[in-house]
Amino acid sequence: MRIGVTVPNFGPAATVDSLRAWAALVEDAGFDLLMVGDHVAATPDVTAAYPGPFWEPLTLLGYLAGVTRRVELGTTVLVVPYRDPLQTARSLAGLDQLSDGRLIVGVGIGWARSEFAALGIDPGRRGEITDEYLGAMLALWSDDVVSFAGRHVAFTDVDTRPRPHRRPHPPLWIGGNGDAARRRAVRWGQAWHPLRVPAGWLRAEGLPALRRAADEAGRPVPALAPRIVLHPSAEHRPDADRLAGEGRPDQIRADLDELRDLGATHVLLDTHRDATTVGHDHAAERAVLEEAAVWLLG
């Protein structure tokens, strides 16, 4: 099981020096993966939780590919309806080539209604748009010249080169905790990427529901690659009121052991708490990660 880190690419503390320090820490401490989030239009519903500046993830990952050598790089999650799939597929293929095949593409449908409005997209249709765009992206990665005809996007004889380094394409993780996300993971993804889940929920509810979705579709069960919090504390937290990754170090290690037993291929750790608080400091979050690396990675 590979262990990664969500790097906060937002907030006043997200400077170029801070982002470079995050990348160095993740790689030097021995973690396997570095991922960043996505917003395009920082409307008030976005900045209430993720204040600016918000670094565009594909641009940022291009930079981080140049200052790292070993870690995989990815998105948690790229909001598929926000970008034309021709642009998205080309950008991601270029990132995968420039990073020597280190890209993982985590995707989702989005949630910020004002952001959808700013981009001229109907949020009520974001699920169907996501499915069609994913189909177009996979087609664009499948051959050197591609045509596609859909309800939301259509194109003819597009030269797609350079195609991704990894064939047929970078691993596609489908983010989200609900039934629709699981069905989408079964249909399109190499992995299901649930986000910030309660302790014990995957074993009791999430994975049984994923297996049912796969059985109903007659398709294989995708891999499991969850994102959990990394919020260590001195006191024991009861499982009934904690997220996976909260509590004493022994509880967090037990969470990772359970995920390993459940067959997770990757686990992404999220140190983020609240970027809107006064004095929010990424250096403090990095210190938590650096200390946790000692008892997580040995």
Image (tube, helix red, strand yellow):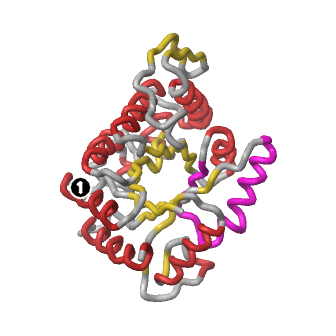
Q: Residue at 56% of width from left, 30% of height from top?
A: 138
121 lies left or right of 188: left
What type of secondary structure mainly makes up the magenta span? helix
Say whether residue 138 is magenta: no
- Provide the residue designation for mark 1: 20
Image coordinates of residue 107 in percent, x first then y, are 51, 43
Q: As displayed, is residue 1 above or below residue 189?
A: below
Vertical arrangement, residue 203 with respect to residue 220, above or below = below
The answer to whether any part of residue 231 appears in the image is: no
The quadrant of the picture occupied by the C terminus is bottom left
Q: Nearer the viewer, residue 238 or 50?
A: 238
- The percent position of residue 144, horizontal first and vertical second, equals 49, 19
Task: Pick the residue in front: 96 or 193.
Answer: 96
Neighbour tally class for label 1: few under 14, some 14-19, many 20 plus, Cα within 10 Å: some
State whether residue 20 appears in this view.
yes
Quarter location, residue 162: top left
